[in-house]
Amino acid sequence: MIRGTDGKRRSVTIHDVAREAGVSRGTVSRVLNGGHYVSPAAQAAVNAAIRKTGYVVNRHARSLITGKSDSVAFLLTEPQERFFEDPNFNVLLRACTQALAARDIPLLLMIAGTEAERRRNLRYIEGGHVDGVLLVSSHSGDPVVSELDAASVPVVACGKPLGQRARVSYVAADDRDGARSMVRYLHDSGRRRIATVTGPADTPGGVERLAGYRDVLAECGLPVDESLIVPGDYSRASGEAAAELLLERAPDMDAVFVASDLMAQGVLDTLSRGGRRVPEDVAVGGFDDSPAALSTRPGLTTVRQPWDRISTEMVRMLLARIAGEEPSAVILPTELVRRGSA
Amino acid sequence: MIRGTDGKRRSVTIHDVAREAGVSRGTVSRVLNGGHYVSPAAQAAVNAAIRKTGYVVNRHARSLITGKSDSVAFLLTEPQERFFEDPNFNVLLRACTQALAARDIPLLLMIAGTEAERRRNLRYIEGGHVDGVLLVSSHSGDPVVSELDAASVPVVACGKPLGQRARVSYVAADDRDGARSMVRYLHDSGRRRIATVTGPADTPGGVERLAGYRDVLAECGLPVDESLIVPGDYSRASGEAAAELLLERAPDMDAVFVASDLMAQGVLDTLSRGGRRVPEDVAVGGFDDSPAALSTRPGLTTVRQPWDRISTEMVRMLLARIAGEEPSAVILPTELVRRGSA
DNA sequence: CCTGCATCTGTGAGCGTTCACAGTAGAGAA
DNA sequence: TTCTCTACTGTGAACGCTCACAGATGCAGG
């Protein structure tokens, strides 16, 4: 803020900087945008003037002419409020924010829980107020993806969007391989009646982790017993329910691979109430390596998703998309984390 | 997007709407901003034209002239990453986002973990790119508060900013009273050797909850035994350590009031490893009513913070501040939630 | 009739920036 | 010399909107 000739507060503009530096607006603008075709002397004068005046570029004016907003949206579309109780979300949001901050790009947080919210957010995004979207939407057939694509808004999704023909980039952990390594580990430690609690069939995690489970059974020549496969919805409560069902259906099981840590917490609980010792009687493996995995007794053996890398990749890919590159996909490896439960 | 006369893509502007509706820019603008001094006929024509053309106002152009951005920042300043592992954060962020969305105000998420990030964010905010700040910064003496105040940026803090002379609004839960009701409850259920694990002394929760604890001891005529007061830092690990210390120092304690659920989790764990039954031997009370409180066995008796109301109040107060009102403070009541641990 | 007032509408200016273009100076080549 | 090329600089015109102001209209009161 500076005082104008009339004594009123006015913010510092590029004009003020230009006058201070003894050059024209154009030159200041060039310095601001990379400094090509600017003499070292002018460059220095402008930088000094910027420091002296405390000038901060007015992004609104810039956006008005460039047609870009230099900001991106983090859009969360979840019918249930699941993702917000999911600790993974924190890590993802946080890492994205920081990766963007490093490039001076603000992140707009949008939550589309209801249909009305979905439309409002979509309208906002399609209005051109953001340059791209980091999308977290686990359920298949989510219309958001195709609508954004139709409006030619660059999108990078977290997790492979199921059943989409939209041209959309995505970053995902290698769910299938993560599941394989867990089930293989259970098998290697001598377990032969391995059950699984899956995620919803309309989420990548639900589908892929189950596929990995089947892979290993086939690979090891174990029979696939469908009664050992119980669906869950990633919630703790569904883990408890699934474990009860398993105890009833297959009391001889000696291991459970659970598709999320939250569900695994429920499974552990039900097992202990059912008199089973973990890992002596039943080994339990989770998925996510969320904080929940540390708070169980025994600690939960689980599969770590590389959230940090996922976030950085998402940001990198989105910026590339915005810069005009074609959509692409990245699958990142997971890591088995051994604790006491298996 | 529409096609211009040259066949190129152009976004729909207020001109297009005006032409479509057969009125002038000014009239469209008036409709957009409340519709005062606009005839019902013009009003209807403009609304129809907006629907027909799919017009979305260009906020950059608007902001350029109004000098307001119609967006607010959610600024999180945490030296440690504590708040992000704190489930309360989710609820707060989520509710704020939605309360703002209802008023069509986007939320910019900013995280200032390091000094460099703090400065970058401050620079951005002071550049006038947001109209106000929802501040989550628990530690006292945080320079952010006074710096924002100096730049006359409207701020509403979550929790009372300690040791500040800045004119800043805040919303807080009644920590002291919440602590009182918990300790009273422990006392009423017959406990007489009541210990406490506190939060950091530079956070409102650390100070106020301890004060509430002392209040009740005085009120009930119990002696204050300083060896029953152990500091923690809100982390689970610090809860474990504190409980170990207590078991050693005061093996005869029959209750612990813990200043956060996360720490209470650690306390429960240590107690059970130390052979104490909860609640038979030792009653445990937490604070927050976070999801963690549901995942313990037995369920954690705790104090619920009204996060939903806190968020709505924060948003309401920030908008009032932006509209020119003076800073104010709101203290909201907490609620005792009884589960098995006490 | 005119005057005054409230209601409604259109127009020019300007917000702060970038972009396209015109122009200058100096170096090197013909 | 003159011409071309590169490096650099300044200027007018946008971008899409709101604001202030000038006009127009309709109606009541004198």
Image: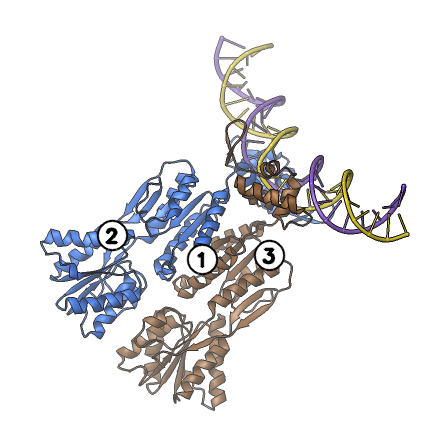
Chain colours: A brown, B blue, C yellow, D purple
Left of A289 or right of it: where is B261?
A: left
B183 up-or-down from A301: above or below: above
Q: Which residue lies furthest to the left in this view?
A: B221
SS assignment at label 3: loop
- Could you say which is closer to the camera, residue A177 or residue B253? B253
Give the image location of residue B337, x and y in percent.
Answer: 24, 59
Q: How far apart are marks 3 and 1 (CA)?
A: 21 Å
Give the image location of residue B178, x and y in percent.
Answer: 23, 53
Are there few (<14), some (14-19), or many (20+) residues within 10 Å of tag 2? some
SS assignment at label 1: loop
Residue beneath the point at 24% across and 51% down: B208
Dot 3: chain letter: A
Residue under pointer 3: A153
Residue under pointer 2: B207
Residue beneath the point at 23% across and 65% down: B242
* Sequence order check, earlier mark of 3 and 1: 1
A158 up-or-down from A211: above or below: above
Looking at the picture, which amino acid does disc 2 mark? Val
Is residue B138 visible from the viewing direction of this image?
yes
